[in-house]
Amino acid sequence: MNANPALVESATVELDDVSKWFGQKVAVSNLTCSFGPGVTGLLGPNGAGKTTLLRMLTGLIRPSQGSVRVLGVWPRTSPSVYANVGLVPEEAAVYPGLTARDYVRYAATLSGVPDVDEAANRAIDAVDLGPPADRKLAGYSKGMRQRAKVAAALVSDPQILLLDEPLNGTDPVQRLHLINLFQRLGDEGRTVIVSSHILDEVDRMSDRVLAIVDGRLAAAGDVAAIRRAMSDIPYRVRIETDANRVLAARLLEEALVHGVSVDDDALIVETGDLSALGRRVPIVAREVDARITTFQPEDASLESVFRYLVKR
Amino acid sequence: MRAAWAITNTTVRQLLGVRRAVIFGLAELAPAAVFFLLVQTMTEEAAITHVVAMIVGLYFPLLIPIVALIIASSALGDERRDGTLSFLVLRPIPRSVIALTKFTGAVTVAAGLNALGALALGAAYGIQTGSWALLVPLAVGGVIASVVYASLAVPLGFFTNWSVLIGLVFVFIFENAVVSALSGLSSLSPWRIGLSAFSGLVPDDVAAELSDIGIASLTGTGTALVRTVVITAASIGVITLVLRRRDLT
């Protein structure tokens, strides 16, 4: 059993103290982690460094520091490893003049697949693209393009599949189908790395999660562990009254209140129990004769949650 | 081999859509059409003068560079802009093969279109004079100039979205103004390399006409070929190096 949750046994993809910076901007910072068979979710807000990380794993960009090994080699100098790696990039990355079938066949040919037609049909069936596969990609919706890209990545039957926000633009039915597909690929023993900024998506398809914020590893482990890590995050509530300072002073006496800050218009209260605060504040307000006009939990977005995880 | 063919074939399809084929195809016929209109009532001697004027005034210094620069700069530039470069390079194929096949695709389209212009002009001259001696020299010169322009434009298209503009500035400012004034620099002018190849293959009367109008420093077909091979090899080397070394974002 590996003590470090960022590392796995039987790793197929390894990063050792990897950093990447573009000029003054640090995109990935001192990242050490590994990936093995099964679905691993790369979770993080937009701009966290997920795409940069995936690009480094494929060798599209080289780390400024540290080393990346995919199946034991650095892909850029060992292109033969690409026969076992499939990437679904976030950007369009399709040839609009080709039909989806031709696009997938092209991918199969470039990957050295022996029976191109059979492999293309299998990959197209796997993503449930159906008859539109013979239409030009120029006329595809974003969700359909995503599925064509997944088919192109799957056509060489890769051992490692890297998916950058693969559910973007897909409708709920497509989303469910792709999630089931990724889970099945993981169950078959492939290393599937899926990036997303949506916790629910990652929760539904991943056995393991690496949370990344500002290029750093914020948390690692199974989804339940990430959820536990999030559960002790204090909530911030914005309260507006006609007596902000008086109410703030009184609230500081309450045990469930972790802190209060006051500005001209409102007070910001931090608490670990939002519903208890919601019940208590009206009572306290009556005591000090303050009239509440606003009681609003502040941004509880994933980004703020991640930032909290990084600060811990 | 199958992958190399697939990349070349797809590149050709990418670069030569229907609209481009029609526009560039019509443009390639322009020198022949103008020549044909000019020489209807003239002597064979005047025909030589006019065909040489078309060759050194329109075909080599304008048509070839414009077509070759636009086509060739798209070969890698479009892949980079459209994000399809990752689709191409994340394959078990050496980057040198990708460089070579993308270059080959670009040259096939650019040289093919420019060869069409050459053949049209050569044929117009043949119909008018009964001499078909310009057909092959024009095609050879056009192809060679196209290859040299592609050698510049394919890597340039990878580096910048302004490759066509930069290329046209090079053609109009450097080649058509600076080199015209300083003939010692003619070896740096792609269309003059093509013209050199052409001049080494033409009959004496056409060669004399070229000389009369002051086309200097024409080194002949052999030297033009050697220069083309060297420039092409350097270009493919640069593209390979870029695909191997640079971050491909």
Image (tube, coloured by chain):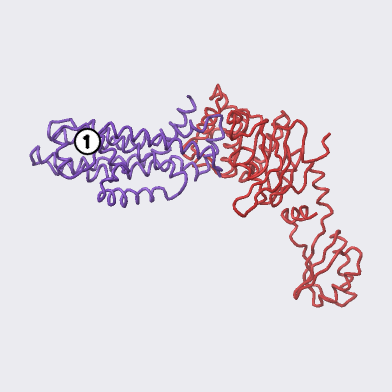
Chain colours: A red, B purple
Res B12 visible: no
Instruction: Tell me the chain of label 1.
Output: B
Q: Quadrant of the C terminus of chain B?
A: top right
Q: How crowded is mark 1: few (under 14 residues within 10 Å), some or many (20 or more)?
A: many
Q: On screen, B120 above or below A217?
A: above
Q: In which quarter of the image is residue B71?
A: top left
Q: Which residue is drawn at 31% across and 35% down?
A: B144
Residue B211 located left or right of residue A65: left
What residue is disc 1 on?
A: B199
| Kind of residue at badge 1 | Ser
Q: Residue at x 26, y 49 (%)?
A: B182
Residue B90 lies, in percent from the top left, at 57, 34
Residue B34 lies, in percent from the top left, at 19, 44
Q: Quadrant of residue A201?
A: top right
Looking at the picture, tell me which residue is in the foreground, A261 or A19: A19
Residue A38 lies, in percent from the top left, at 73, 33
Residue B154 lies, in percent from the top left, at 42, 41
Residue A253 located left or right of residue A205: right
- State the residue lying farthest toward the front: B184
